[in-house]
Amino acid sequence: MPSPCILVLFDVDHTLVETRGIGREMYERVFPAVTGVPFHKLAAVSGRTELDIIRETLDLHGVEPTAEAIRKLADALAAGYDAARDELAERGRALPGVLRSLATLAGEPKIHLGVLTGNLRAVAQIKLEVFGLDRYLDLETSAYGDDHAVRSELVAIAQRRAAERTGVTFGNRRTILIGDTPNDVEAGLVAGVSVIGVATGESTTQELREAGATWVIADLADPISLLQVIDQNS
C-alpha cells in the first residue's frame, strides 16, 4: 500500500456528531460533586478546548482553577460520559452522511484520517465509539482538548503523532483541518494549515468564509464532493 500523503483532521462536535445538550448536562451532573459548589453557568464552548472551558467555568463559580481542580473535573466528565453511553446513543446522532463520507475517505490510501477536537481524549473516544465512527479514524494520531489549552497548538501535536505512527512527515501544505466554527478556522490558519469549514453547527457558510476558511461546504453528506475538495490540496 502506498504511504498516505494528506493528513485530514476532523473536529467532533457539530462536525461529525451532535450530542443534543448532553455536554452542558454533564457539567450540571458532575460539577457540584467535584467542587462542592452548585453549578449555575458554563463557559462558552464553541471551538474551544475542554481545558480552557474547565478553567473558565471554575473561575465563573469562584473556584480557583488549579491543576488539581482542573484534573478532577476533567476526570469526572470522562467518567460521566462513560456511564452515559446508552443515553448518548439514544439522544445524540452522527450527522447525516458522515459515516459514508468517513468510509469513503478511509478507503483512499493517500489520506490519513484523524481528529482535532477540543474534547477530552476519553470523551472524544466515547462519542466516536457510540456512533460507530472510531473505526475510520486513527485516534492515536489525533489531538485533544487535554493535550493543550490552545486549540491551534493541537495541529502540531496531531502532525507529530501521525508522523511517528506512519513514518510520513505531514507538513502544513499536506494537512487539512475540518471544522464547523470560526474558532476551528482560526486554529487552522494560525497553525498554517488549510481549513474546510462545514456549516453543520451554528455558523453559516458566510461566517465561515469571513473567518478565512480555505473552502466552505454545507455539510459532509457528499463524500465525492468532499474528496474533490481534499484533492485540491494534494
Image (cartoon, rainbow, N blue to C red):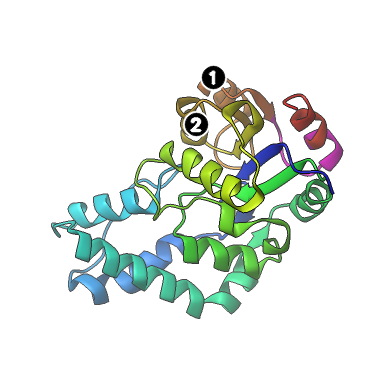
* Quadrant in the rendering for residue 210: top right
Question: Is residue 144 inside the magenta stretch?
Answer: no
Q: Is residue 12 visible?
A: no
Front residue (pair 165, 113): 165
- Considering the numbered disc 1 on the image, is that residue within a helix, a strand or a loop? helix
The residue sitting at 57% across, 50% down in the picture is 164
Question: Is residue 219 inside the magenta stretch?
Answer: yes
Mark 2 / mark 1, whichever is N-terminal: 2
Q: Is residue 206 visible?
A: yes
Q: Amino acid at mark 2?
A: Pro
Front residue (pair 162, 186): 162
Residue 40: x %, y % from top left: 26, 60
Q: Which residue is mark 2?
A: 182
Marks 2 and 1, how far apart in space?
9 Å
In the rendered image of this protein, does residue 150 appear above or below residue 51?
above
As drawn, the label of residue 210 is 1
Residue 175: x %, y % from top left: 62, 34
**Segment colored magenta:** 217-226
Say few, some or many: other residues with alpha carbon within 10 Å of mark 1 (under 14 / 14 to 19 / 20 or more): few
Say few, some or many: other residues with alpha carbon within 10 Å of mark 2 (under 14 / 14 to 19 / 20 or more): many
* Quadrant in the rendering for residue 6: top right
As drawn, the label of residue 163 is none
Marks 2/1 in contact by CB < 8 Å: the verdict is yes
Q: Amino acid at mark 1?
A: Glu
The single residue placed furthest to the front in the displayed view is: 167
- Considering the numbered disc 2 on the image, is that residue within a helix, a strand or a loop? helix
Residue 103: x %, y % from top left: 81, 54
* Relative horizontal placement of residue 130, taking residue 149 as reference (left or right): right
In the rendered image of this protein, does residue 153 appear above or below residue 43?
above
The residue sitting at 79% across, 29% down in the picture is 231
Q: Quadrant of the C terminus?
A: top right
In the rendered image of this protein, does residue 60 appear above or below residue 73?
above
